[in-house]
Amino acid sequence: MNEAEQQRLLELGKQHKKFYEDVSINIEGYKVNHRLFFLAMYMNKFSDNTKAYAVVSFEKHSYEEAMEAMYPLTSYFVTWNNVLDSIKHRAQVDFSILEEVRDYLKRIVNAQVSGIDISVYERSLRIIQSMLDLQEEMKQLWQEADKMDKNIREKVFFDDQEIEQLIMYNLKGNWIQYAQFKDRYDYCDDFDVIYDNRNIPEVKKHESFTNKKTLFNMRSNIAADQLKKSIDRLTEGKAPMDYETYMEHFYVVYKERLVESYERDKKMLRYPLS
């Protein structure tokens, strides 16, 4: 959609704007009977709270067609914002500290330092490496979601299959976060041992951290509570969960919540009016 078309769309949305309101229109539309519909949102000028919605189109349309478009339009908007929160933000997190921890553990394991329980280091190395590998999956997931968004913006509309794909991206992003945290939490006491061993001469020589408090901050009494809170948030208190159980359960939950969100938004609909 070029700049002139975007301006025309904005003017269309302004037809339903009230005094002291700002209007925002998603430029990704949805087709019903080959007619393209868009979602307009009306916000108070002095806050970010959404006051009302409108489903608008350049083409002549019926009330029923506009209402048919509303659920997919709101579903796409909600899910894309969730993807930005659960995937884009997470994909941009700096994992360089964990890379330093991984390299530290690897040096100790490779050296087979005596006088310590090397199995603790081997297990922690596997867990940290898994967290880093999962982070690469998160980055790839964001690239796929971003590519899909660009394709949708280019063609100016999305379909039901793309909404489903976006939902799966969101759920997969949440699963990756859970998978990153669960083993780290289960074995968080390992870093108490690793911290206590840090000054053993044969261990100390392998230390090379940008932040001297890195191992201190990995200890269970610092990390465990936050890990547990993250796991509880991502699983809604249902951990442990395997991948298939997680995806199946939260797919159903997510779809139910989209319907609930739609029902709330429908009460705020300014156009069309029945």
Image (cartoon, grey):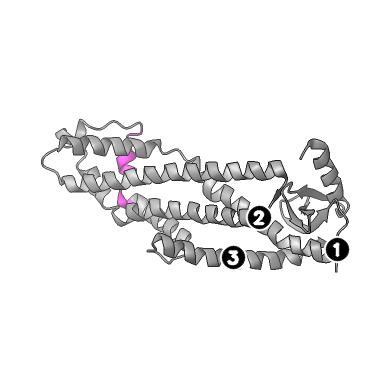
Q: Which residue range is magenta in the image?
A: 211-221
Residue 246, visible in the rendered structure:
yes
Q: CA distance from mark 3 to mark 2?
A: 12 Å
Cα distance in 3D space between marks 2 and 1? 22 Å
Q: Is residue 214 left or right of residue 114?
A: right
Residue 176 x %, y %: 44, 51
User: Residue 43 placed where, x, y %?
Assistant: 77, 53
Magenta segment includes 215: yes
What is the spatial separation of the Cα atoms under label 1 and label 3, in whole angstroms? 27 Å
Question: In the rendered structure, which amino acid carries the disc numbered 3?
Answer: Lys
**Above/below status of 151 relative to 165:** above
Residue found 32% across the figure and 44% down from its top:
128
Left or right side of 220 for 50 = right
Residue appearing at x 43%, y 65% in the figure: 245
Residue to which mark 2 is pinned:
76
Circle 1: element type? loop
Mark 2 element type: helix
Pointer 2 or 1: first along the chain = 1
Crowding at mark 3 (Cα within 10 Å: few <14, some 14-19, many 20+): some
Q: Give the side of residue 208 with respect to residue 81, left or right.
A: left
Asked which quadrant contains residue 30, the reply is bottom right
**Which residue, given by chain and number where applicable, does mark 1 sit on?**
62
Q: Amino acid at mark 1?
A: Ser
Residue 218 is at least partly visible in this image: no
Q: Is residue 268 placed above or below 148 in the rendered structure?
A: below
Q: Furthest residue to the left? A: 115
Residue ID for mark 3: 255
Tag 3 or tag 1, which sits nearer the N-term? 1
Of circles 1 and 3, the one toward us is 1
* In the foreground, 97 or 35: 35
